[in-house]
Image: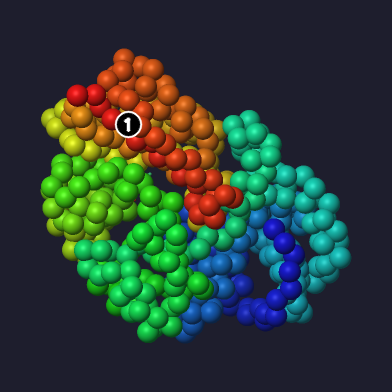
Amino acid sequence: MQAYKIKMRLHRNLCFATIDGLTLIFNEGKYADKVIQQLLKRDKRWGARDRAFVAETTYEIVRWKRLYSEIAEVKEPYSREDLWRVFAVWATLRGIKLPDWKYFENTPSRKIKGRFDELSKIRKFKESIPDWLDEAGEKELGKAVWTKEIEALNQQADVILRVNTLKTTKEKLQAELFDLEIDTEFIKDHPSALKLKERANVFTTEAFKNGHFEVQDASSQLVAEFLNVEPGMRVVDACAGAGGKALHLASLMENKGQIIAMDIYDHKLKELKRRAKRDGAHNIEPRHIDSTKVIKKLYDKADRVLIDAPCSGLGILRRNPDAKWKLQPEFIENIKKTQQEILQQYSRMVKPGGQMVYATCSILPSENKNQVDTFLASEMGEVFTFVKDKSILAHKSGFDGFYMALLEKKK
Ligand SMILES: C[S@@+](CC[C@H](N)C(=O)[O-])C[C@H]1O[C@@H](n2cnc3c(N)ncnc32)[C@H](O)[C@@H]1O
């Protein structure tokens, strides 16, 4: 977190919207992305800059909640007055001139900067994270790596697109977006990725509506590729959710073969169906896991199985900063049990000679390599061999933190 100067005038109704949003997120436990979506519908006259101000300021204050609250000397549950004080800290550290509104009367600008310098010497304040997370991160990754990693996870993420090769090419999409004044660049070793040089709302473009791309982080784009799929194969995406990876698999398989996309939540699969239609992905078959029968029916039947496991999501904090406050250590302990159960059960769908990828968007070894090691040492894991894995850290890659391991079932 850097204090830097920018020229910006604060507009009253935009600041009000931000404070309203923060009240819902901090005091009522609402999800930041949902709250922001609602806020942006508030005033039809708002232009792109106004909307960007509300969205980005809300996310920034959510990201730096602990640091700003310490500086402002306020505690939860926040009163409206407290939130204005937090807002004043945000504005002061950004070098924004505070208007003479009553909410900003007696804002101690010098003291704010002094407190910022002082608190920045202590990692859990500087990086604005709960004590337990700071301890867990250091314990798992070691002091030097965790210090760099949490700093990287607090940066705003770039917008990355995955070109849908079922409908277009990377070069054509780049040209299509360039015509709309959206400038992009290729990313080395990420064959389907385009990175936006400046943030823009890509969801309103015809290219998006026509399914020419999906928004998907560069690290996430490596997962489907790790599975070595080929057109014509039978592939199970066992934790498909709304289908980010399943849609990528369909592209890599050129719409040939079968992708069985499963999840325990049917509403996510419905969203997947909608996206598949837009993307022209015809070989995805959603299957709701409503009993263990759904899995058992596929024992020894799949050429490839993807387990994109539920996880802490610590690798994607950049785009989901309120997870810092919503996540609890007990949740991580429970999700680790689920991860191992899923590995034990779903690996049975791989046919002899077939392959499986276990992936998470976590940076914690206990959710990643340790899970794979535990699996390989178990009775079920005996029939698998470890082929390779990849741990992606945000401070090294510049993209989300991810893990993926490729295992092969013996013939
Ligand atoms: C990391 S997310 C998947 C993201 C998705 N693959 C994508 O690329 O967009 C993990 C998914 O696992 C699902 N899940 C949780 N427990 C599960 C279980 N026991 N079996 C199958 N899916 C499960 C969650 O609903 C969630 O959608």
Q: Quadrant of the C terminus?
A: top left
Question: Dividing the image into four equal quarters, which quarter contains ligand 1?
Answer: top left
Q: Is residue 279 above or below residue 5?
A: above
294 or 139: which is nearer to us? Answer: 139
The residue that appears at 70% across and 76% down in the rendered structure is: 6
Q: How is the image coloured?
A: rainbow
**Mark 1 secondary-structure assignment:** strand
The residue that appears at 44% across and 40% down in the rendered structure is: 390
Looking at the image, residue 292 sits to the left or right of residue 149; the answer is left
235 or 203: which is nearer to us? Answer: 235
Q: How many marks?
A: 1
Query: Would residue 30 be visible to someone looking at this image?
Result: no
Looking at the image, residue 116 sits to the left or right of residue 17; the answer is right
Percent of width and height locating residue 18: 58, 67
Query: Label 1 amino acid?
Result: Leu
Q: Quadrant of the N terminus?
A: bottom right
Q: Which residue is mark 1?
A: 407
Percent of width and height locating residue 29: 52, 50
Looking at this view, name the residue that lies furthest to the top.
379
The residue that appears at 70% across and 44% down in the rendered structure is: 124
The residue that appears at 38% across and 50% down in the rendered structure is: 222
- Quadrant for residue 187, please give it: bottom left
Percent of width and height locating residue 331: 48, 34
The CB of the residue at mark 1 lies under 8 Å from ligand 1: no
Q: Is residue 343 above or below residue 127?
A: above
Query: Would residue 364 be visible to someone looking at this image?
Result: yes
Percent of width and height locating residue 352: 19, 27
